[in-house]
Amino acid sequence: MRLVSWNVNGIRAAVRNGFWSWLEDDGPDILCLQETRIQPEQLTPKMHKPPGYHALWHAGERRGYSGVATLSRERPGSAREGFGQPRFDVEGRTLLTRHRSFTLLNVYFPNGGRGYERVLFKIDFYDALLAYCGQLRSAGERLVVCGDFNTSHQPIDLARPKENEKTSGFLPEEREALSRWLDAGFVDVYRQLHPDKREYTWWTYRFDARARDIGWRLDYFLLTEDLLPDVRDARILGDVQGSDHCPIALELDL
């Protein structure tokens, strides 16, 4: 089974940039999109029913902001928008789907770049979602959590760590919030398989950053440890254009 996660920075912009052709060529079993920036009434018929996929969309209350979508070849057993925390759920950041061998959480974690109040909101989100995942695990569910985490965890995960120590996305408290997930038993599968590899998933549109590969690794697949024996590969699809993020892929023997 092949899963792909991608912050498209606006699904309508991604469509203009060749999204449907890319999806047909890549053909993942499950595709998780973040920052879709679209309301239900703005979805086209093709977005409602992509060829070969079942599609679920979760939008926030604020127009043109946030939002996630999960496309899967097999219909999920069940689905849930949000995770029961109204202050977070109104922003349309999480979509849970249950599949045969695991439960999938597609998540667009908050960006802390609009002031320290949003950094605190972001950390609260990290911790509240981790607590919710703890409940799912206690109920015996195997979890895949993917999406744009909006944090680079270690210096290897961004091109210029020293210059960004006081920048949201690499603040100590944000990194500690992500560490709490790993300490709780989640595995950053890409870093597990590629401990010394420097690859990035996001580049600012300024300064020709992508061509110069001055980027950040902000997008992750985190797995509960009981899924590790099923992992075949995890890759960053850095050649895929169409957003300021690139997709990431996970292959499971399921």
Image (cartoon, helix red, strand yellow):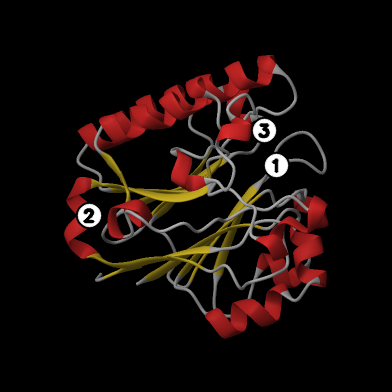
Residue drawn at 69 percent across, 61 percent down = 212
Residue 184 horizontal/vertical position (percent): 26, 30
| Among the two numbered marks 1 and 3 on one chain, the one whose residue lies closer to the N terminus | 1
Residue drawn at 25 percent across, 44 percent down = 141
In space, the residues marked 1 and 3 are separated at their CA atoms by: 6 Å
Q: Left or right of 183: which side holds 24?
A: right
In space, the residues marked 3 and 2 are separated at their CA atoms by: 29 Å
Q: Quadrant of the N terminus?
A: bottom left
Q: Which amino acid, mark 2?
A: Leu
* Relative depth, front residue between 188 and 138: 188
Tag of residue 91: 3
Q: Is residue 90 above or below residue 32?
A: above
Check whether the beta carbons of the residues at disc 1 and disc 3 lie within 8 A of each other: yes
Report how many numbered discs are placed on residues in the image.
3
Tag of residue 140: none
Q: Residues within 10 Å of mark 3 (few under 14, many from 20)?
A: many
> Which residue reaches farthest front?
162
Question: Is residue 204 visible from the viewing direction of this image?
Answer: yes
